Amino acid sequence: MFRENSERKRPRRDLQPSRRPVKVGDILEVKIVGTGREGDGFARVSGFVVFVPNSREGETHKVKITKVFSKYAFAEIIE
């Protein structure tokens, strides 16, 4: 059986690694510029949002990227 055109799987363009300025394992120094809905602080790296739990707006932290998604990433504080 063949799928109809509407069911055909297409590549997810939003997952192209070249669009993301960070990758898992990167260590960066970031300034927390705001707070997300869940209360996590967030920074921006080349416009890309990086959530940093247990941080507050105005703080600067050295962080390690732990998860990367198409439009945002998570990091943990290492210093």
Image (spheres, helix red, strand yellow):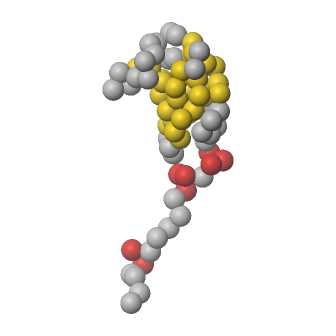
Viewport quadrant of the C terminus: top right
Q: Residue at x 53, y 64 (%)?
A: 11
Q: Position of residue 64 (x, y in %)?
A: 59, 28
Closest to the observer: 64 or 38?
64
Any part of residue 50 in sight: no
Would residue 50 be found to the left or right of residue 1 on screen? Answer: right
Any part of residue 11 in sight: yes
Residue farthest bottom in this picture: 1
Q: Position of residue 62 (x, y in %)?
A: 61, 18
Residue farthest front in this picture: 78
Closest to the observer: 29 or 16?
29
Would residue 10 be found to the left or right of residue 24 on screen? Answer: left
Q: Residue at x 53, y 21 (%)?
A: 77
Viewport quadrant of the N terminus: bottom left
Q: Residue at x 46, y 12 (%)?
A: 57
Would residue 7 be found to the left or right of residue 61 on screen? Answer: left
Q: Position of residue 24 (x, y in %)?
A: 60, 39
Vertical placement of residue 79 versus 4, above or below: above
Q: Quadrant of residue 27?
A: top right
| Figure label count | 0
Q: Position of residue 43 (x, y in %)?
A: 53, 23
Q: Residue at x 51, y 17 (%)?
A: 32
